Image (tube, coloured by chain):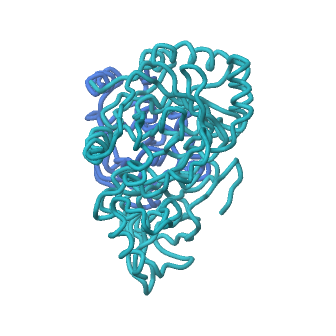
Amino acid sequence: MSNIPSDLRYAASHEWARLEADGSVTVGISDHAQEALGDVVYVELPEVGRQLNAGQEAGVVESVKAASDIYAPVAGEVIAVNEALADSPELVNSDPYGSWFFRLQPSDTSELDKLLDAAGYQAACDADA
Amino acid sequence: MGQRTPLYDQHLALGAKMVDFGGWDMPLHYGSQVEEHHQVRRDCGVFDVSHMTVVDVSGEQARDYLQRLLANDVARLKSTGRALYSAMLNERGGVIDDLIVYLTDWGYRLVVNASTRDKDLAWMQAQAAGFAVEVRERPELAMLAIQGPHARARTSELVSQARAGLIHDLKPFQGMADGDWFIGRTGYTGEDGLEIILPAEQAPDFLSELVGAGIPPIGLGARDTLRLEAGLNLYGQDMTEDVSPLAANMGWTVAWEPTERDFVGRAALEQQRARDDLPKLVGLVLEERGVLRAHQVVRVNGVGDGEITSGSFSPTLGKSIALARVPAGTAERAEVEIRGKWYPVRVVQPTFVRHGKVLV
């Protein structure tokens, strides 16, 4: 059973998003996603300053098994990336909700409301299985 | 639902993530593929390889038949227990399958791939016409591979004295029967180890004993990264019916002498051998971050293009490696296209790791 914290929002493509106090949005991949991928060995992050649309490809996560795209859950500008994942991609497996990929300055914070809540994401994962 | 080995229920109980492999429901990993990989390089682990196909060949002309069927020459097997690796070719010199053949008291035992079972058996039966030979599949047998530097010592503690003695005495690439078990000192990991073929009904208890003794189960995921580091080909990826063994780093398995031995595919191979432009299978090492994958394009400056046949992350090297088929003139450097960008790679002999040691 995967862990789905109730204080986060989720995209159907398995990213989580957290609205920070300063109005930025932190993005990572869910426990369900890391579990499905298996051992993560490489993470490709977006460039800081890049403008992303909601649902746009923002990076790549590769496990021993396969490569998967990471999408921006909401539109915005990339203001920071988690460089620690370059050296230690396995953190995505051990701590999926602590291992953020990038932080966005959202164009429209209300877009977060269009994402799934924990119950909705749980239902989506169950439908996948 | 796919086919199941006699150990299917145990895989589930051990927490395996199951995947389809050539029509079989097999364990991909039991938690972490990378940890399982290291476990085999450093200590030992056990693989269920019961999906593989065991075929016994007996009869007056068993040797003549296999000398015709296989590109390697079973006449090289001078005493019971000796084994060799060979390609089984079609008339065009393409690889129908790769296999291991042991010389036994009753004739020969072959172990061929799971995904190629049907076509292999059909081909072997067709080629048997005109030979006094019996070709018999042994689906009632299971197979466990215990691999790693401590595999033989740890396994010996769990079996009868006679079998422990046999395990001690076996030389690399030998296999012998003991009662209803057949124990080979062979494998697919680049480490020392055993492959034990036993009646299916005995396999669950034996696996329980191995796991109970602290020899953990290892999935197909780690099996793939272990064989890739060892530079061992995977049928269907690194060679196929459209690929010559000479273009798959298998030239050493073709027995050209004696010249009068007319094995299937010989005429085609003789022609290929005379060419100097046959592509070759090499190893690639990506020095930058990223992961090489099968079918990515390889570009060799001023020489031509090639293709990755197998690629992954190497847990032992901590970087990505691959097998690639490239033009004959390829030297030490090449580039690989990953998601539209070109990355420099080092071209190496396709054996990256053997017996725990990095060779590149």
**Residue B218, relative to residue B250: is it above or below?**
above
Residue B60 visible in the shown view: yes
Residue A81 visible in the shown view: no
Q: Position of residue B189 (x, y in %)?
A: 58, 44
Residue B313 is left or right of residue A66, and the answer is right
Residue A62 is left or right of residue B160, and the answer is left
Question: Image quarter for residue B44?
Answer: top right
Question: Image quarter for residue B288?
Answer: bottom right
Q: Position of residue A122 (x, y in %)?
A: 33, 22
Q: Position of residue B134 (x, y in %)?
A: 35, 35
Question: Image quarter for residue A46?
Answer: bottom left
Residue nearer the viewer, B354 or A105: B354
Residue nearer the viewer, B276 or B148: B276
Please identify the quadrant where the C terminus of chain A is shown: top left
Residue at 42%, 75% in the rendered image: B273
Residue A37 is left or right of residue B176, and the answer is left
**Residue B230, relative to residue B101: is it above or below?**
below
Residue at 64%, 53% in the rendered image: B353
Q: Position of residue B258 (x, y in %)?
A: 49, 66
**Residue A99, relative to residue B154: is it above or below?**
below
Please identify the quadrant where the N terminus of chain A is shown: top left
Residue at 73%, 34% in the rendered image: B169
Give the colour chain B carries in the figure.
cyan
Give the colour chain A carries in the figure.
blue
Q: How many marks?
A: 0
Residue nearer the viewer, B141 or B102: B102
Can you name the residue that lies furthest to the bottom here?
Answer: B302
